[in-house]
Amino acid sequence: MAELWFVGVGLGSERDLSGRAQELLGRSPAIFAEEYTSLLAPGSIDRLAGRLGRPIQRLGREALESERPVLEALAHHPRVALLVVGDPFAATTHTALRIAAERAGHRWHYIPNASILTAAASFLGLMHYRFGRTVSIPFPAPGFAPTSFLDGIRENRQRGLHTLVLLDLRPSEGAFLTAGEAIRILQERDGPPPVLPPGAELAVVARIGTDEADAAIGRPEVLARIDFGPPLHALVVPAAPLHEVEAAAVARFRKT
């Protein structure tokens, strides 16, 4: 029986690893990292491998979802670590791998870290308990224009809840959906009835968890014209009305 450690790296770089995580990695003969669900600052994995003095094998989506590389490593090593950007179990794929490891007779352990699921709210100053279901906007493609994310936003707004909107990324291709592109997609596919009535505001968060974190709140047509810089970006559709504390917190980010 081997141990599989799911290690959250956080949102910025390898510097965000906890002391406990670094101690664990120093004792792990096999280390994997996945960066398809999110992405760290460039060079983070290489710098960490250099510090540890051992290789870190990157896993793409197909390899991780197959579960084969990790399960094979567990069959040959007493301890295996999987590095995940953000918090490990924010993605269903990692929970499925946890179940597969259990079925193979192995133990699993969990080292949490910061996640965009909570960090976006914290940075903006919005109340965590006022968030409803998280939705995602995928890259547009010919013949592919889903509107399911609008249903989630509409349901949340009807319940007086904020919505975190995650934006698609393909790190292996260097492709990241930007806030401006996502806002235009939202506007093009919105309604009827519209989830963003006239006067409604959006919020953008960029590079949360890094020293270059930024945010803005304002009307969609205003935010769509702003260049928010390098990835990663996300949107937040605030509930209306904002609590007075929330309104005061986001005021510093307002664009007109």
Image (cartoon, helix red, strand yellow):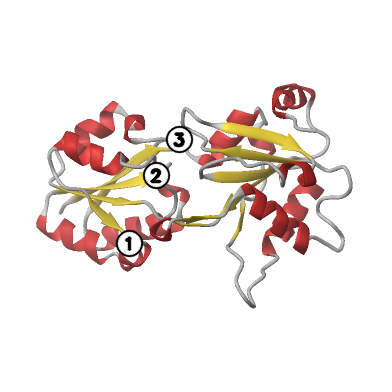
Which of the two residues, 83 or 105, is positioned nearer the viewer here?
Answer: 83
Callout 2: SS: strand
Q: What element carries label 1?
A: helix
Residue at x-position 73% and y-position 59% = 150
Residue 206 in the image: x percent, y percent?
56, 38
Amino acid marked by disc 3: Ala
Give above or below for 10 relative to 98. Answer: above
What numbered label is drawn on residue 64?
A: 1
Looking at the image, residue 244 lies above or below residue 22: above
Residue 199 versus residue 177 in the image, above or below: above
Q: Is residue 241 left or right of residue 60?
A: right
Q: Residue at x 63, y 33 (%)?
A: 215
Residue 85 — which label? 2
Q: In this orientation, does residue 39 appear? A: yes
Residue 237 position by quadrant? top right
Residue tagged 3: 114
| Residue 214 position by quadrant | top right
Measure the C-alpha gap from mark 1 to mark 3: 21 Å
Who's the residue at 32% across and 29% down the image?
18
Q: Position of residue 157 (x, y in %)?
A: 78, 47
